[in-house]
């Protein structure tokens, strides 16, 4: 008779560390493979936690959206996503919570919606930003990462990896300043203009963003401050 394997707490801790490694990479990478890895790790982490009897994310809207996107990416086709940044310095006033977007062409995302169930489609509407030509899935994955962190903290998973410590520093800064830990996403142009055209023509690559940030700012423990000599 085949024995049923019991997933352990240590297995869940290992998968949680793996998730935060890929989550950190995704948050600053233009690489589709990094997106694929973080989507797969979300699914795997939920599976291990469920099998270990430590809870799951089946009631979480971000997870349902991510699971559907992951299934399409793994089993059907590429997402054709592009992770880019809003201009660090811009002549055009821009309003938005964050500077990074992970854009999937709207025609490709329609295929994901068609392949997904009702619950996933309802989650898309609540967790993803829709534009005319693209959808931005960055807020969904970003917010799941924050919720996952608080989830594993409640389980007393005291992870001490570099990626988790950076996230903790960021969350502590937000707490001290009464900032929300979560983002809605979406950008607007306060002085008018077409947001869709802006997304198509004015975004910069993640490498360009990195070079500009390194020129203008110093970084310590995941926090950035303007160089006084600039």
Image (tube, rainbow, N blue to C red):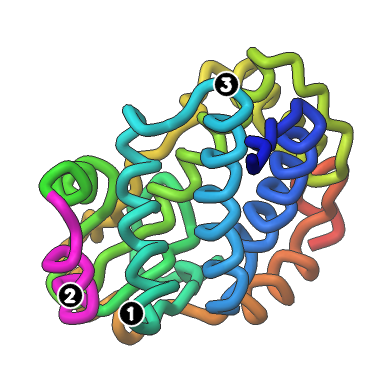
**Above or below, comparing residue 47 to residue 23 in the picture:** above
Q: Position of residue 196 (x, y in %)?
A: 20, 74
**Above or below, comparing residue 196 to residue 230 in the picture:** below
Q: Nearer the viewer, mark 3 or mark 2?
A: 3
Say whether disc 1 or disc 2 marks the residue closer to the N-terminus: 1
Disc 3/disc 2 C-alpha distance (Å):
34 Å
Q: Position of residue 13 (x, y in %)?
A: 77, 34
Q: Which residues are magenta?
A: 106-117
- Nearer the observer, 1 or 148: 1
Residue drawn 60% across the image and 65% down it: 37
Q: Position of residue 183 (x, y in %)?
A: 41, 39
Per the image, is 82 magenta?
A: no
Q: Are marks 3 and 1 in contact (CB under 8 Å)?
A: no
Q: Residues within 10 Å of mark 3 (few under 14, many from 20)?
A: few
Residue drawn 38% across the image and 52% down it: 67
- Nearer the observer, 31 or 74: 74
Residue at which label 1 appears: 76
- Element assignment for label 2: helix
Say whether disc 3 or disc 1 marks the residue closer to the N-terminus: 3
- Which quadrant of the figure has residue 77? bottom left
Q: Residues within 10 Å of mark 2 (few under 14, many from 20)?
A: some
Residue 111, numbered label: 2
Disc 3/disc 1 C-alpha distance (Å):
31 Å
Disc 1/disc 2 C-alpha distance (Å):
10 Å
Residue drawn 60% across the image and 58% down it: 27
Q: Are marks 1 and 2 in contact (CB under 8 Å)?
A: yes
Residue at which label 3 appears: 53
């Amino acid at each position: 008779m085949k024995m049923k394997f019991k997933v352990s707490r240590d297995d869940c801790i290992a998968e949680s560390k793996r998730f935060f490694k890929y989550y950190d990479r995704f948050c600053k990478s233009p690489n589709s493979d990094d997106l694929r890895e973080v989507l797969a790790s979300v699914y795997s982490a939920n599976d291990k936690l469920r099998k270990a009897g430590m809870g799951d994310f089946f009631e979480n809207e971000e997870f349902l959206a991510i699971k559907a996107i992951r299934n399409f990416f793994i089993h059907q086709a590429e997402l054709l996503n592009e992770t880019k940044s809003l201009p660090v310095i811009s002549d055009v006033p821009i309003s938005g919570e964050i500077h990074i977007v992970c854009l999937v062409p709207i025609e490709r995302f329609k295929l994901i919606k068609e392949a997904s169930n009702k619950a996933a489609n309802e989650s898309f509407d609540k967790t993803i930003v829709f534009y005319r030509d693209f959808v931005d899935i960055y807020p969904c994955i970003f917010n799941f990462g924050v919720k996952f962190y608080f989830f594993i903290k409640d389980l007393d998973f005291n992870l001490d990896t570099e990626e988790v410590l950076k996230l903790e520093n960021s969350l502590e800064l937000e707490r001290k300043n009464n900032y929300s830990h979560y983002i809605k996403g979406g950008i607007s142009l306060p002085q008018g203009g077409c947001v869709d055209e802006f997304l198509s023509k004015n975004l910069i690559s993640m490498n360009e963003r990195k070079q500009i940030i390194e020129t203008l700012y110093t970084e310590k423990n995941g926090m950035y401050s303007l160089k006084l000599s600039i």
